[in-house]
Amino acid sequence: MSHRNKRGIALLVVAAGLWLAGAAAFAQDQPAPKWEVFAGYSWADANAKINNVPLRNYAVGLGAAGTYDFNKWLGFTLDYGGHFNSSTSGTRIPSTLNTFMVGPKLTLRGEHFSPFLEAMAGVSRLTPDHFQQDTRLGAMGGAGIDMNLTKHWALRVIQADYMYASHRFGSGGSAQTGFPHTTVHGVRLQGGIVYLGGGEEEAPVSASCSVDPSEVWAGEPVKATVTPQNFNPKHTLNVDWTTNGGKVGGTGQSVTIDTTGAAEGQSYNVGAHVTDPHDKKAVASCQTSFSTKKRLPPTITCNANPSSVEQGGSITIHSDASSPQGGPVTIAVTSSCGASGQGTDVAVDTSSIQPGSCNVTCSVTDDHQLTASSTSSFSVQPKPVVQPPPTLVLRSVYFATAQPTAKNPNAGLVKSQQDTLTGIASEFQKYLAVKPDAKLELEAHADPRGSEEYNQALTERRAARVKSFLVGQGVPGDSIDTRALGKQEQLSGDNVKQSMEDDPSLTAGEKRRLQTNMRTIVLAANRRVDMKVEAPGVTSQLSERRYPFSAADALSLIGGREKPKVAPRPRTGTRKGTARKGTTKGGTRRKKK
Protein backbone atom coordinates (compact mmCIF):
# COMPACT_ATOMS: atom_id res chain seq x y z
CA MET A 1 0.00 0.00 0.00
CA SER A 2 1.39 3.43 -0.99
CA HIS A 3 2.16 6.20 1.44
CA ARG A 4 -0.65 8.29 -0.01
CA ASN A 5 -3.22 5.53 0.51
CA LYS A 6 -2.10 5.05 4.08
CA ARG A 7 -2.47 8.76 4.70
CA GLY A 8 -6.03 8.76 3.33
CA ILE A 9 -7.07 5.79 5.42
CA ALA A 10 -5.57 7.38 8.54
CA LEU A 11 -7.57 10.53 7.83
CA LEU A 12 -10.79 8.50 7.57
CA VAL A 13 -10.03 6.77 10.88
CA VAL A 14 -9.39 10.14 12.56
CA ALA A 15 -12.62 11.58 11.14
CA ALA A 16 -14.66 8.60 12.29
CA GLY A 17 -13.09 8.79 15.76
CA LEU A 18 -13.85 12.51 15.87
CA TRP A 19 -17.49 11.85 15.02
CA LEU A 20 -17.89 9.01 17.51
CA ALA A 21 -16.31 11.05 20.31
CA GLY A 22 -18.64 13.94 19.59
CA ALA A 23 -21.63 11.60 19.42
CA ALA A 24 -20.82 9.97 22.76
CA ALA A 25 -20.20 13.24 24.54
CA PHE A 26 -22.85 15.53 23.10
CA ALA A 27 -25.66 13.53 21.50
CA GLN A 28 -29.12 14.42 22.78
CA ASP A 29 -32.60 14.34 21.35
CA GLN A 30 -32.96 17.76 19.71
CA PRO A 31 -35.36 18.94 16.97
CA ALA A 32 -33.86 19.18 13.44
CA PRO A 33 -33.98 22.04 10.92
CA LYS A 34 -35.41 21.45 7.47
CA TRP A 35 -32.29 22.63 5.65
CA GLU A 36 -28.77 23.84 6.42
CA VAL A 37 -26.43 26.25 4.56
CA PHE A 38 -22.68 26.27 5.26
CA ALA A 39 -20.07 28.82 4.12
CA GLY A 40 -16.49 29.11 5.32
CA TYR A 41 -12.78 28.72 4.86
CA SER A 42 -11.38 25.56 3.26
CA TRP A 43 -7.78 24.30 3.29
CA ALA A 44 -6.69 21.32 1.20
CA ASP A 45 -3.72 19.21 0.24
CA ALA A 46 -4.22 17.20 -2.99
CA ASN A 47 -1.33 14.90 -2.07
CA ALA A 48 -0.68 14.34 -5.81
CA LYS A 49 2.33 14.48 -8.20
CA ILE A 50 2.69 15.24 -11.92
CA ASN A 51 5.81 13.79 -13.46
CA ASN A 52 7.04 13.13 -9.91
CA VAL A 53 6.67 16.80 -8.97
CA PRO A 54 4.20 17.32 -6.08
CA LEU A 55 1.37 19.81 -6.23
CA ARG A 56 1.46 22.73 -3.82
CA ASN A 57 -0.95 22.87 -0.84
CA TYR A 58 -3.99 25.12 -1.21
CA ALA A 59 -3.74 27.86 1.35
CA VAL A 60 -6.58 29.84 -0.25
CA GLY A 61 -9.94 28.11 -0.36
CA LEU A 62 -13.68 28.52 -0.06
CA GLY A 63 -16.16 25.93 1.18
CA ALA A 64 -19.93 25.96 0.74
CA ALA A 65 -22.63 23.32 1.25
CA GLY A 66 -26.37 22.99 1.37
CA THR A 67 -28.17 20.12 3.15
CA TYR A 68 -31.79 19.07 3.01
CA ASP A 69 -32.78 17.19 6.19
CA PHE A 70 -35.27 14.36 5.81
CA ASN A 71 -35.45 13.93 9.60
CA LYS A 72 -33.34 14.76 12.63
CA TRP A 73 -30.64 12.23 11.63
CA LEU A 74 -30.49 11.90 7.82
CA GLY A 75 -29.93 14.61 5.21
CA PHE A 76 -28.72 15.00 1.60
CA THR A 77 -25.83 17.40 0.98
CA LEU A 78 -24.66 19.37 -2.10
CA ASP A 79 -21.02 20.41 -1.48
CA TYR A 80 -18.63 22.80 -3.29
CA GLY A 81 -14.96 23.35 -2.56
CA GLY A 82 -12.74 25.82 -4.39
CA HIS A 83 -8.95 25.78 -3.74
CA PHE A 84 -6.38 28.10 -5.39
CA ASN A 85 -2.62 28.35 -5.36
CA SER A 86 -0.85 30.49 -8.04
CA SER A 87 2.46 30.96 -6.25
CA THR A 88 5.46 29.97 -8.37
CA SER A 89 7.99 29.93 -5.57
CA GLY A 90 9.52 26.63 -4.59
CA THR A 91 9.67 23.40 -6.52
CA ARG A 92 6.00 22.40 -6.17
CA ILE A 93 3.49 22.90 -8.95
CA PRO A 94 0.78 25.49 -8.28
CA SER A 95 -2.73 24.49 -9.31
CA THR A 96 -6.47 25.03 -8.86
CA LEU A 97 -8.77 22.36 -7.46
CA ASN A 98 -12.59 22.57 -7.58
CA THR A 99 -14.94 19.87 -6.30
CA PHE A 100 -18.69 19.49 -6.77
CA MET A 101 -20.04 16.62 -4.61
CA VAL A 102 -23.42 15.24 -3.45
CA GLY A 103 -24.25 12.55 -0.91
CA PRO A 104 -25.92 11.57 2.38
CA LYS A 105 -25.17 13.15 5.72
CA LEU A 106 -25.78 11.55 9.15
CA THR A 107 -26.13 13.91 12.15
CA LEU A 108 -26.62 13.37 15.87
CA ARG A 109 -28.15 16.55 17.23
CA GLY A 110 -27.25 17.65 20.74
CA GLU A 111 -28.13 20.60 22.89
CA HIS A 112 -24.71 22.20 22.36
CA PHE A 113 -22.91 20.15 19.70
CA SER A 114 -24.04 18.19 16.64
CA PRO A 115 -21.45 15.75 15.24
CA PHE A 116 -22.00 14.50 11.67
CA LEU A 117 -20.70 12.04 9.06
CA GLU A 118 -20.89 12.43 5.27
CA ALA A 119 -20.02 10.42 2.14
CA MET A 120 -20.24 12.07 -1.29
CA ALA A 121 -19.45 11.52 -4.92
CA GLY A 122 -19.28 13.97 -7.84
CA VAL A 123 -16.89 15.98 -10.01
CA SER A 124 -13.23 16.85 -9.33
CA ARG A 125 -11.63 19.53 -11.58
CA LEU A 126 -7.83 19.91 -11.31
CA THR A 127 -5.92 22.64 -13.25
CA PRO A 128 -2.12 22.58 -12.74
CA ASP A 129 0.01 25.38 -14.24
CA HIS A 130 1.18 24.63 -17.78
CA PHE A 131 -1.38 21.86 -18.12
CA GLN A 132 -4.88 21.75 -19.44
CA GLN A 133 -7.59 21.38 -16.81
CA ASP A 134 -8.91 17.89 -16.26
CA THR A 135 -12.42 17.08 -14.98
CA ARG A 136 -13.05 13.60 -13.62
CA LEU A 137 -15.37 11.72 -11.27
CA GLY A 138 -14.28 11.84 -7.63
CA ALA A 139 -15.35 10.89 -4.12
CA MET A 140 -15.16 12.49 -0.71
CA GLY A 141 -16.00 11.44 2.85
CA GLY A 142 -15.40 12.66 6.38
CA ALA A 143 -16.80 14.00 9.62
CA GLY A 144 -17.24 17.21 11.55
CA ILE A 145 -18.78 18.94 14.58
CA ASP A 146 -21.16 21.93 14.62
CA MET A 147 -21.49 23.99 17.79
CA ASN A 148 -25.04 25.31 18.25
CA LEU A 149 -25.18 29.07 18.88
CA THR A 150 -28.89 29.80 18.53
CA LYS A 151 -31.88 28.11 17.07
CA HIS A 152 -30.86 29.23 13.55
CA TRP A 153 -27.09 29.62 13.72
CA ALA A 154 -24.23 27.21 14.42
CA LEU A 155 -20.45 27.33 14.18
CA ARG A 156 -18.77 24.53 12.23
CA VAL A 157 -15.78 24.01 14.50
CA ILE A 158 -14.08 21.60 12.15
CA GLN A 159 -14.80 19.39 9.18
CA ALA A 160 -12.21 16.91 7.89
CA ASP A 161 -12.68 15.11 4.57
CA TYR A 162 -10.71 12.67 2.47
CA MET A 163 -10.68 13.45 -1.29
CA TYR A 164 -10.11 11.00 -4.12
CA ALA A 165 -9.88 11.53 -7.91
CA SER A 166 -7.80 10.24 -10.82
CA HIS A 167 -6.67 12.82 -13.47
CA ARG A 168 -4.84 12.67 -16.85
CA PHE A 169 -3.51 15.81 -18.51
CA GLY A 170 -2.64 16.89 -22.06
CA SER A 171 0.44 19.06 -22.94
CA GLY A 172 0.37 22.61 -21.75
CA GLY A 173 3.49 23.95 -23.48
CA SER A 174 6.52 23.12 -25.55
CA ALA A 175 8.43 22.09 -22.48
CA GLN A 176 5.87 19.47 -21.58
CA THR A 177 5.19 16.41 -23.67
CA GLY A 178 3.05 13.33 -23.28
CA PHE A 179 -0.10 12.84 -21.15
CA PRO A 180 0.93 12.70 -17.50
CA HIS A 181 -1.34 10.99 -14.92
CA THR A 182 -1.95 11.75 -11.21
CA THR A 183 -4.25 10.51 -8.43
CA VAL A 184 -5.57 12.79 -5.71
CA HIS A 185 -5.46 11.25 -2.22
CA GLY A 186 -6.07 14.53 -0.51
CA VAL A 187 -7.19 16.09 2.73
CA ARG A 188 -9.67 18.92 3.13
CA LEU A 189 -10.21 20.87 6.36
CA GLN A 190 -13.06 23.38 6.72
CA GLY A 191 -14.63 25.68 9.25
CA GLY A 192 -17.26 28.39 9.15
CA ILE A 193 -20.85 29.43 9.77
CA VAL A 194 -23.99 27.27 9.37
CA TYR A 195 -27.45 28.68 8.97
CA LEU A 196 -30.31 26.42 10.08
CA GLY A 197 -33.68 27.04 8.50
CA GLY A 198 -37.18 25.63 8.68
CA GLY A 199 -37.78 22.70 11.01
CA GLU A 200 -40.20 22.38 13.88
CA GLU A 201 -41.91 25.46 15.28
CA GLU A 202 -41.47 26.20 18.96
CA ALA A 203 -44.35 24.80 20.94
CA PRO A 204 -46.13 27.30 23.20
CA VAL A 205 -45.32 27.09 26.91
CA SER A 206 -47.90 25.51 29.20
CA ALA A 207 -48.26 24.08 32.69
CA SER A 208 -50.29 21.31 34.33
CA CYS A 209 -51.18 21.10 38.04
CA SER A 210 -51.80 18.04 40.21
CA VAL A 211 -52.47 17.30 43.89
CA ASP A 212 -51.78 14.22 45.98
CA PRO A 213 -53.99 13.05 47.54
CA SER A 214 -57.04 14.56 45.94
CA GLU A 215 -59.25 13.86 48.99
CA VAL A 216 -58.14 14.37 52.61
CA TRP A 217 -59.48 14.87 56.09
CA ALA A 218 -59.47 18.50 57.18
CA GLY A 219 -56.08 19.14 58.78
CA GLU A 220 -54.19 16.63 56.65
CA PRO A 221 -51.54 17.99 54.21
CA VAL A 222 -51.93 18.05 50.43
CA LYS A 223 -48.94 18.04 48.07
CA ALA A 224 -49.40 20.27 45.01
CA THR A 225 -47.12 19.97 41.95
CA VAL A 226 -46.87 21.98 38.73
CA THR A 227 -45.26 20.55 35.58
CA PRO A 228 -44.08 23.27 33.13
CA GLN A 229 -43.90 22.37 29.43
CA ASN A 230 -41.86 23.90 26.59
CA PHE A 231 -40.04 26.37 28.86
CA ASN A 232 -36.33 26.89 28.39
CA PRO A 233 -34.75 24.12 30.50
CA LYS A 234 -31.72 26.31 31.21
CA HIS A 235 -33.77 28.89 33.05
CA THR A 236 -34.99 28.78 36.66
CA LEU A 237 -38.73 29.43 36.66
CA ASN A 238 -40.82 31.40 39.15
CA VAL A 239 -44.00 29.77 40.46
CA ASP A 240 -46.72 31.62 42.40
CA TRP A 241 -49.22 29.38 44.24
CA THR A 242 -52.74 30.22 45.39
CA THR A 243 -55.46 28.21 47.16
CA ASN A 244 -58.74 28.85 48.99
CA GLY A 245 -58.41 25.67 51.09
CA GLY A 246 -55.60 26.41 53.52
CA LYS A 247 -52.04 27.71 53.67
CA VAL A 248 -49.35 27.14 51.02
CA GLY A 249 -46.02 26.07 52.48
CA GLY A 250 -42.78 26.14 50.51
CA THR A 251 -41.79 27.43 47.07
CA GLY A 252 -40.93 25.99 43.69
CA GLN A 253 -42.68 23.45 41.55
CA SER A 254 -43.86 21.32 44.56
CA VAL A 255 -45.45 22.78 47.69
CA THR A 256 -47.49 21.54 50.66
CA ILE A 257 -50.94 22.88 51.51
CA ASP A 258 -51.93 22.88 55.19
CA THR A 259 -55.71 22.25 55.32
CA THR A 260 -56.14 23.01 59.02
CA GLY A 261 -59.42 24.89 59.46
CA ALA A 262 -60.92 23.75 56.15
CA ALA A 263 -64.56 22.74 56.33
CA GLU A 264 -65.52 19.08 55.94
CA GLY A 265 -67.13 17.86 52.74
CA GLN A 266 -65.98 20.82 50.60
CA SER A 267 -63.97 21.23 47.38
CA TYR A 268 -61.06 23.71 47.20
CA ASN A 269 -59.05 25.16 44.28
CA VAL A 270 -55.28 25.24 43.86
CA GLY A 271 -53.61 27.41 41.19
CA ALA A 272 -50.04 27.90 39.92
CA HIS A 273 -48.70 30.81 37.80
CA VAL A 274 -45.38 30.00 36.07
CA THR A 275 -43.10 32.70 34.59
CA ASP A 276 -39.60 32.74 33.06
CA PRO A 277 -37.65 35.76 34.40
CA HIS A 278 -35.50 35.68 31.22
CA ASP A 279 -38.42 35.55 28.78
CA LYS A 280 -41.40 37.79 29.45
CA LYS A 281 -43.48 35.93 26.89
CA ALA A 282 -43.02 32.58 28.62
CA VAL A 283 -46.03 32.63 30.97
CA ALA A 284 -48.41 29.77 31.84
CA SER A 285 -51.02 29.01 34.49
CA CYS A 286 -52.92 25.95 35.65
CA GLN A 287 -55.52 24.98 38.23
CA THR A 288 -56.63 21.84 40.03
CA SER A 289 -58.67 21.04 43.13
CA PHE A 290 -58.88 18.81 46.18
CA SER A 291 -61.75 18.01 48.53
CA THR A 292 -62.16 17.31 52.24
CA LYS A 293 -63.99 14.27 53.52
CA LYS A 294 -67.10 14.52 55.68
CA ARG A 295 -66.86 12.55 58.91
CA LEU A 296 -69.64 10.08 59.64
CA PRO A 297 -70.65 9.00 63.15
CA PRO A 298 -69.58 5.59 64.40
CA THR A 299 -71.88 2.54 64.37
CA ILE A 300 -72.55 -0.03 67.10
CA THR A 301 -74.62 -3.16 67.75
CA CYS A 302 -74.68 -5.15 70.97
CA ASN A 303 -76.24 -8.30 72.41
CA ALA A 304 -76.30 -10.27 75.65
CA ASN A 305 -74.94 -13.81 75.66
CA PRO A 306 -76.73 -15.76 76.97
CA SER A 307 -79.93 -13.77 76.87
CA SER A 308 -81.30 -15.58 79.93
CA VAL A 309 -79.49 -16.97 82.96
CA GLU A 310 -80.24 -18.16 86.48
CA GLN A 311 -79.43 -15.73 89.22
CA GLY A 312 -75.73 -15.99 90.00
CA GLY A 313 -74.77 -16.90 86.44
CA SER A 314 -72.56 -14.80 84.18
CA ILE A 315 -73.65 -12.83 81.10
CA THR A 316 -71.38 -11.14 78.53
CA ILE A 317 -72.48 -7.94 76.78
CA HIS A 318 -70.71 -8.05 73.41
CA SER A 319 -70.50 -4.92 71.20
CA ASP A 320 -69.44 -4.55 67.56
CA ALA A 321 -68.48 -0.92 66.97
CA SER A 322 -66.39 0.93 64.37
CA SER A 323 -65.78 4.32 62.81
CA PRO A 324 -66.33 4.74 59.04
CA GLN A 325 -63.15 6.78 59.08
CA GLY A 326 -61.21 3.90 60.62
CA GLY A 327 -60.25 5.85 63.76
CA PRO A 328 -60.26 4.52 67.35
CA VAL A 329 -63.53 4.21 69.30
CA THR A 330 -64.47 3.71 72.96
CA ILE A 331 -67.45 1.64 74.13
CA ALA A 332 -69.45 2.07 77.36
CA VAL A 333 -72.23 -0.18 78.70
CA THR A 334 -74.98 0.88 81.13
CA SER A 335 -78.15 -0.94 82.20
CA SER A 336 -81.37 -0.57 84.17
CA CYS A 337 -80.23 -3.21 86.67
CA GLY A 338 -76.92 -1.61 87.64
CA ALA A 339 -74.65 -3.59 85.35
CA SER A 340 -72.03 -1.39 83.64
CA GLY A 341 -68.57 -1.47 82.14
CA GLN A 342 -66.38 -0.46 79.22
CA GLY A 343 -64.97 -2.38 76.28
CA THR A 344 -66.05 -4.73 73.55
CA ASP A 345 -66.99 -7.50 76.02
CA VAL A 346 -68.40 -6.60 79.43
CA ALA A 347 -68.96 -9.46 81.92
CA VAL A 348 -72.02 -9.14 84.16
CA ASP A 349 -72.28 -11.11 87.42
CA THR A 350 -76.01 -11.61 88.17
CA SER A 351 -75.52 -12.67 91.80
CA SER A 352 -76.74 -9.27 93.05
CA ILE A 353 -79.31 -8.68 90.29
CA GLN A 354 -82.93 -9.36 91.12
CA PRO A 355 -84.83 -11.80 88.88
CA GLY A 356 -86.52 -10.12 85.93
CA SER A 357 -85.65 -8.33 82.69
CA CYS A 358 -82.69 -5.93 82.42
CA ASN A 359 -82.34 -3.36 79.59
CA VAL A 360 -78.81 -2.61 78.34
CA THR A 361 -77.55 0.49 76.46
CA CYS A 362 -74.25 0.29 74.57
CA SER A 363 -72.68 3.62 73.52
CA VAL A 364 -69.71 4.33 71.22
CA THR A 365 -67.63 7.52 70.89
CA ASP A 366 -64.99 8.11 68.18
CA ASP A 367 -61.84 10.25 68.31
CA HIS A 368 -63.82 13.31 67.15
CA GLN A 369 -66.51 12.91 69.84
CA LEU A 370 -69.14 11.64 67.43
CA THR A 371 -71.42 9.10 69.16
CA ALA A 372 -73.96 6.35 68.52
CA SER A 373 -75.79 3.82 70.69
CA SER A 374 -77.59 0.48 70.56
CA THR A 375 -79.76 -1.44 73.03
CA SER A 376 -80.23 -5.04 74.12
CA SER A 377 -81.64 -6.89 77.12
CA PHE A 378 -81.30 -10.05 79.17
CA SER A 379 -83.37 -11.77 81.82
CA VAL A 380 -82.41 -13.23 85.20
CA GLN A 381 -84.32 -16.32 86.34
CA PRO A 382 -84.80 -17.20 90.03
CA LYS A 383 -82.33 -19.79 91.23
CA PRO A 384 -84.19 -23.12 91.66
CA VAL A 385 -84.36 -24.68 95.10
CA VAL A 386 -82.00 -27.62 94.99
CA GLN A 387 -82.74 -30.57 97.24
CA PRO A 388 -79.63 -31.65 99.12
CA PRO A 389 -78.45 -35.15 98.28
CA PRO A 390 -79.29 -37.84 100.83
CA THR A 391 -76.72 -38.75 103.44
CA LEU A 392 -74.68 -41.75 102.49
CA VAL A 393 -73.37 -44.30 104.99
CA LEU A 394 -70.20 -45.63 103.40
CA ARG A 395 -68.33 -48.61 104.78
CA SER A 396 -65.05 -50.08 103.63
CA VAL A 397 -65.29 -53.73 102.55
CA TYR A 398 -62.75 -56.40 103.44
CA PHE A 399 -61.33 -59.46 101.69
CA ALA A 400 -59.80 -62.67 102.93
CA THR A 401 -56.11 -63.29 102.32
CA ALA A 402 -55.18 -63.47 98.57
CA GLN A 403 -58.81 -63.03 97.49
CA PRO A 404 -59.99 -62.82 94.78
CA THR A 405 -57.57 -65.01 92.88
CA ALA A 406 -56.48 -64.58 89.27
CA LYS A 407 -58.24 -67.84 88.38
CA ASN A 408 -61.49 -66.78 90.08
CA PRO A 409 -61.66 -62.95 89.99
CA ASN A 410 -65.38 -62.90 90.85
CA ALA A 411 -64.85 -64.62 94.24
CA GLY A 412 -63.65 -63.17 97.52
CA LEU A 413 -66.69 -61.16 98.73
CA VAL A 414 -68.09 -62.85 101.87
CA LYS A 415 -71.78 -62.48 102.65
CA SER A 416 -71.41 -59.72 105.24
CA GLN A 417 -69.46 -57.58 102.69
CA GLN A 418 -71.99 -58.31 99.96
CA ASP A 419 -74.75 -57.10 102.31
CA THR A 420 -72.75 -53.93 102.99
CA LEU A 421 -72.29 -53.26 99.24
CA THR A 422 -75.96 -53.95 98.52
CA GLY A 423 -76.99 -51.20 100.96
CA ILE A 424 -74.38 -48.79 99.58
CA ALA A 425 -75.57 -49.45 95.98
CA SER A 426 -79.16 -48.67 96.93
CA GLU A 427 -78.25 -45.44 98.74
CA PHE A 428 -75.84 -44.27 95.98
CA GLN A 429 -78.52 -44.65 93.31
CA LYS A 430 -80.76 -42.32 95.34
CA TYR A 431 -77.79 -39.95 95.63
CA LEU A 432 -77.30 -39.98 91.85
CA ALA A 433 -80.94 -39.01 91.35
CA VAL A 434 -80.11 -35.69 93.07
CA LYS A 435 -76.47 -35.32 92.00
CA PRO A 436 -76.13 -37.11 88.63
CA ASP A 437 -72.54 -35.90 88.26
CA ALA A 438 -71.40 -37.59 91.48
CA LYS A 439 -68.58 -40.14 91.36
CA LEU A 440 -67.98 -43.12 93.67
CA GLU A 441 -64.24 -43.75 93.96
CA LEU A 442 -62.96 -47.20 95.02
CA GLU A 443 -59.45 -47.49 96.50
CA ALA A 444 -58.19 -51.08 96.87
CA HIS A 445 -55.45 -52.06 99.37
CA ALA A 446 -53.46 -55.16 100.33
CA ASP A 447 -51.53 -56.22 103.44
CA PRO A 448 -47.75 -55.90 103.30
CA ARG A 449 -47.11 -59.53 102.51
CA GLY A 450 -46.28 -60.46 98.95
CA SER A 451 -44.24 -58.70 96.27
CA GLU A 452 -45.04 -55.31 94.78
CA GLU A 453 -46.21 -56.86 91.50
CA TYR A 454 -48.36 -59.45 93.23
CA ASN A 455 -50.05 -56.97 95.56
CA GLN A 456 -50.66 -54.50 92.72
CA ALA A 457 -52.45 -57.14 90.65
CA LEU A 458 -54.34 -58.32 93.74
CA THR A 459 -55.67 -54.81 94.52
CA GLU A 460 -56.68 -54.35 90.88
CA ARG A 461 -58.82 -57.52 91.15
CA ARG A 462 -60.33 -56.36 94.47
CA ALA A 463 -61.32 -52.96 93.02
CA ALA A 464 -62.75 -54.62 89.89
CA ARG A 465 -64.70 -57.14 92.02
CA VAL A 466 -66.33 -54.41 94.14
CA LYS A 467 -67.19 -52.36 91.03
CA SER A 468 -68.73 -55.34 89.22
CA PHE A 469 -70.85 -56.13 92.29
CA LEU A 470 -72.13 -52.54 92.51
CA VAL A 471 -72.88 -52.47 88.78
CA GLY A 472 -74.77 -55.70 89.26
CA GLN A 473 -76.84 -53.88 91.89
CA GLY A 474 -77.83 -51.16 89.40
CA VAL A 475 -75.09 -48.53 89.87
CA PRO A 476 -73.98 -47.02 86.46
CA GLY A 477 -70.46 -48.11 85.63
CA ASP A 478 -69.41 -44.64 84.42
CA SER A 479 -70.24 -43.27 87.90
CA ILE A 480 -67.54 -45.48 89.47
CA ASP A 481 -63.80 -44.85 89.37
CA THR A 482 -61.21 -47.34 90.69
CA ARG A 483 -57.69 -47.12 92.02
CA ALA A 484 -55.39 -50.04 92.87
CA LEU A 485 -52.84 -48.95 95.49
CA GLY A 486 -51.02 -52.25 96.16
CA LYS A 487 -48.88 -51.81 99.25
CA GLN A 488 -49.37 -48.05 99.39
CA GLU A 489 -51.10 -46.25 102.28
CA GLN A 490 -50.84 -49.14 104.78
CA LEU A 491 -52.65 -48.82 108.12
CA SER A 492 -50.30 -49.07 111.11
CA GLY A 493 -51.02 -50.97 114.29
CA ASP A 494 -51.87 -47.72 116.03
CA ASN A 495 -54.37 -46.85 113.27
CA VAL A 496 -56.12 -50.21 113.66
CA LYS A 497 -56.06 -50.08 117.46
CA GLN A 498 -57.63 -46.61 117.40
CA SER A 499 -60.28 -47.87 114.98
CA MET A 500 -61.11 -50.69 117.38
CA GLU A 501 -61.33 -48.25 120.28
CA ASP A 502 -63.77 -46.10 118.29
CA ASP A 503 -65.97 -49.09 117.31
CA PRO A 504 -69.12 -48.79 119.52
CA SER A 505 -70.18 -52.35 118.68
CA LEU A 506 -67.24 -53.88 120.61
CA THR A 507 -67.29 -54.35 124.36
CA ALA A 508 -64.27 -53.65 126.52
CA GLY A 509 -63.64 -57.34 126.98
CA GLU A 510 -63.81 -57.99 123.23
CA LYS A 511 -61.38 -55.18 122.60
CA ARG A 512 -58.91 -56.73 125.08
CA ARG A 513 -59.21 -60.15 123.50
CA LEU A 514 -58.68 -58.74 120.03
CA GLN A 515 -55.54 -56.91 121.06
CA THR A 516 -53.92 -60.21 122.01
CA ASN A 517 -53.86 -61.13 118.31
CA MET A 518 -53.09 -57.63 116.96
CA ARG A 519 -50.81 -58.69 114.10
CA THR A 520 -53.53 -60.78 112.48
CA ILE A 521 -56.08 -57.99 112.96
CA VAL A 522 -53.73 -55.40 111.33
CA LEU A 523 -53.18 -57.64 108.32
CA ALA A 524 -56.94 -58.17 107.94
CA ALA A 525 -57.62 -54.41 108.23
CA ASN A 526 -55.29 -53.71 105.27
CA ARG A 527 -57.08 -56.16 102.94
CA ARG A 528 -59.83 -53.65 102.18
CA VAL A 529 -61.49 -51.43 99.57
CA ASP A 530 -62.20 -47.86 100.77
CA MET A 531 -64.90 -45.69 99.20
CA LYS A 532 -65.23 -41.97 98.60
CA VAL A 533 -68.06 -39.91 97.03
CA GLU A 534 -67.13 -36.77 95.08
CA ALA A 535 -69.78 -34.35 93.75
CA PRO A 536 -69.53 -30.68 92.66
CA GLY A 537 -70.65 -28.36 95.41
CA VAL A 538 -70.86 -31.14 98.00
CA THR A 539 -68.30 -32.05 100.65
CA SER A 540 -66.53 -35.32 99.92
CA GLN A 541 -67.64 -38.36 101.94
CA LEU A 542 -65.21 -41.14 102.99
CA SER A 543 -66.11 -44.68 103.95
CA GLU A 544 -65.82 -45.66 107.59
CA ARG A 545 -63.11 -48.27 108.21
CA ARG A 546 -64.88 -50.57 110.67
CA TYR A 547 -63.82 -54.21 110.56
CA PRO A 548 -66.90 -56.50 110.78
CA PHE A 549 -65.93 -58.30 113.98
CA SER A 550 -69.58 -58.98 114.79
CA ALA A 551 -70.35 -60.53 111.41
CA ALA A 552 -70.96 -64.23 111.22
CA ASP A 553 -68.15 -64.67 108.69
CA ALA A 554 -65.69 -62.31 110.41
CA LEU A 555 -63.27 -65.13 111.22
CA SER A 556 -63.13 -66.15 107.58
CA LEU A 557 -61.71 -62.72 106.77
CA ILE A 558 -58.79 -63.23 109.13
CA GLY A 559 -58.05 -66.82 108.19
CA GLY A 560 -60.93 -68.74 109.82
CA ARG A 561 -61.18 -70.37 113.24
CA GLU A 562 -58.29 -72.35 114.70
CA LYS A 563 -58.29 -75.99 113.62
CA PRO A 564 -58.83 -78.53 116.50
CA LYS A 565 -55.74 -80.36 117.68
CA VAL A 566 -55.29 -83.92 116.30
CA ALA A 567 -54.95 -86.71 118.97
CA PRO A 568 -51.66 -88.60 118.82
CA ARG A 569 -51.69 -91.93 117.09
CA PRO A 570 -51.51 -95.07 119.35
CA ARG A 571 -48.32 -97.03 119.37
CA THR A 572 -48.35 -99.94 116.96
CA GLY A 573 -47.81 -103.58 118.16
CA THR A 574 -47.97 -102.82 121.94
CA ARG A 575 -51.54 -103.94 122.64
CA LYS A 576 -52.64 -107.54 122.41
CA GLY A 577 -55.33 -108.39 120.01
CA THR A 578 -54.85 -105.12 118.24
CA ALA A 579 -53.54 -105.31 114.77
CA ARG A 580 -51.67 -102.52 113.16
CA LYS A 581 -53.30 -100.62 110.45
CA GLY A 582 -52.75 -102.33 107.22
CA THR A 583 -52.22 -105.79 108.73
CA THR A 584 -54.44 -108.78 109.37
CA LYS A 585 -54.83 -110.67 112.46
CA GLY A 586 -51.99 -113.00 111.93
CA GLY A 587 -49.59 -110.21 111.38
CA THR A 588 -49.90 -110.30 107.67
CA ARG A 589 -49.88 -106.79 106.09
CA ARG A 590 -52.75 -105.99 103.69
CA LYS A 591 -51.96 -104.72 100.29
CA LYS A 592 -53.25 -101.27 99.24
CA LYS A 593 -55.94 -101.08 96.65
Image (cartoon, helix red, strand yellow):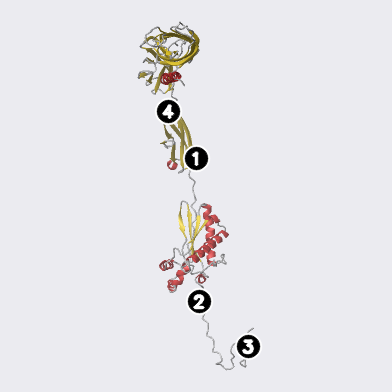
Mark 1 and mark 3 residues within 8 Å of each other at the beta carbon:
no
Marks 4 and 2, how far apart in space? 94 Å
Disc sitting over residue 590 in the figure: 3
Mark 4 vs mark 2, foreground winner is 4
Residue 149 placement (x, y as % from top left): 39, 11
Mark 2 vs mark 3: in front: 3
Identified by mark 2, the residue type is: Glu
Q: Callout 1: few (<14), some (14-19), or many (20+) C-alpha neighbours within 10 Å? A: some
* CA separation in Å, label 2 and label 3: 36 Å
As rendered, which of 206 and 465 lies closer to the eye?
206
Mark found first going from the N terminus, 1 or 2? 1
Q: Count neighbours of disc 2 (C-alpha within 10 A) and say few if under 14, some if 14 to 19, many if 20 or more.
A: few
Question: Which label lies toward us, 4 or 3?
Answer: 3
Residue appearing at x 37%, y 12% in the figure = 276
Residue 562: image tag: 2
Q: Position of residue 414 (x, y in %)?
A: 54, 67
Going 53% across and 53% down the picture, which residue do you hit?
433
From the viewer's perspective, tell me whether residue 590 is left or right of residue 310.
right
Where is mark 4, residue-wise? 371
Give the camera-side residue of 172 and 177.
Answer: 177
* Circle on res. 308: 1
Q: Position of residue 240 (x, y in %)?
A: 37, 14
Q: Earlier in the sequence, mark 1 or mark 4?
A: 1
Cα gap from disc 1 to disc 3, whole angstroms: 98 Å
Whichever of labels 4 and 3 marks the residue nearer the N terminus, that label is 4
**In the displayed structure, would residue 429 be above or below residue 528?**
above
